[in-house]
């Protein structure tokens, strides 16, 4: 499976695509996509991911965006993007200093592939969406699990200072696979509340 990595080396940032395949033995193919100097006018913005079934709301704008130094919000939901009224409601309280996008999964992939110096907050409703956006997930600084209502298949609940977050077996398996790639995953409702690491949660359900 191909992977997209961002590698820091001195004053350079390299984007590298890695393909792993087997043909008369095991081989790894490295494809250099581009190299960017860490200069202000060419710097690569940071990407943070939040899982929150409310998408854009007051806590996003008032708390998370200033704390993370966000300049662009990308909310991904294939249903919301079809509803102009819902999109208007979600964006009406967002200050103009934040570039705001409510987009489909495919549109999100295209936006995130573009070189940009903006720090971005990518928001998805469900953990399962992270699999569809795997290329970007591998390059993110952190995944923050915020709020997720109970569903028919959920069996785990994290509550308290971290908000209320329900997870299914498939959610846990997916997040385990992401954490195994050294991506930081935490539960946290607000920057001012307690942060619970993914490893701490996993230990609590063994």
Image (cartoon, rainbow, N blue to C red):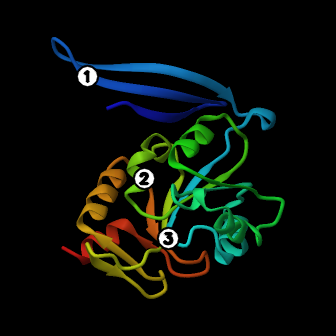
Residue that protrudes farthest toward the top in the picture: 24
Picture residue at 70% right of the left edge, 39% below the top: 116
Depth order, front residue of 198/104: 104
Q: Position of residue 68 (x, y in %)?
A: 66, 62
For label 2, the residue is 130
In this picture, residue 67 sits left or right of residue 96: left
Residue 55's disc is: none
Residue 182 in view: no
Q: Nearer the viewer, mark 3 or mark 2?
A: 3
3D distance between C-alphas at marks 3 and 2: 13 Å
Q: Position of residue 122 (x, y in %)?
A: 58, 55
Depth order, front residue of 160/169: 169
Q: Are marks 1 and 2 in contact (CB under 8 Å)?
A: no
Q: Nearer the viewer, mark 1 or mark 3?
A: 3
Label 3: state its secondary structure. loop
Depth order, front residue of 114/93: 93
Picture residue at 40% right of the left edge, 61% below the top: 127
Tell me the quadrant of the picture where the C terminus can be found: bottom left
Q: Position of residue 106 (x, y in %)?
A: 52, 42
Q: Is residue 122 above or below residue 145?
A: above
3D distance between C-alphas at marks 1 and 2: 23 Å
Q: Are marks 1 and 3 in contact (CB under 8 Å)?
A: no
Q: Is residue 174 above or below residue 86?
A: above
For label 1, the residue is 21
Residue 53's disc is: 3
Residue that protrudes farthest toward the right in the picture: 96
Question: How many C-alpha atoms fall within 10 Å of the one at disc 3: few (<14), some, or many (≥20)?
Answer: some
Q: Earlier in the sequence, mark 1 or mark 2?
A: 1
Q: Are marks 3 and 2 in contact (CB under 8 Å)?
A: no
Q: Is residue 136 above or below residue 48?
A: above
Picture residue at 25% right of the left edge, 72% below the top: 153
């Amino acid at each position: 499976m191909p992977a997209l990595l961002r590698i820091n080396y001195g004053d350079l940032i390299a984007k590298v695509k890695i393909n792993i395949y087997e043909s008369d033995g095991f081989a790894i193919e490295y494809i250099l996509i581009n190299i960017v100097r860490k200069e202000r006018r060419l710097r690569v913005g940071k990407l943070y991911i939040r899982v929150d079934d409310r998408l854009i709301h007051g806590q996003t704008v008032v708390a998370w965006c200033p704390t993370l130094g966000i300049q662009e919000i990308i909310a991904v939901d294939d249903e919301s993007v079809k509803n102009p009224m819902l999109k208007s409601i979600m964006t009406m309280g967002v200050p103009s200093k934040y570039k705001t996008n409510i987009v489909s999964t495919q549109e999100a992939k295209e936006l995130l592939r573009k070189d940009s110096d903006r720090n971005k907050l990518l928001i998805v409703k469900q953990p399962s969406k992270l699999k569809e956006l795997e290329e970007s997930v591998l390059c993110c600084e952190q995944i923050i699990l915020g709020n997720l209502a109970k569903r028919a298949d959920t069996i785990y609940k994290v509550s308290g200072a971290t908000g209320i977050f329900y997870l299914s077996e498939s959610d846990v398996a997916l997040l385990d696979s992401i954490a195994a790639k050294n991506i930081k995953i935490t539960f946290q409702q607000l920057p001012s509340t307690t942060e619970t690491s993914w490893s701490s949660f996993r230990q609590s359900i063994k």
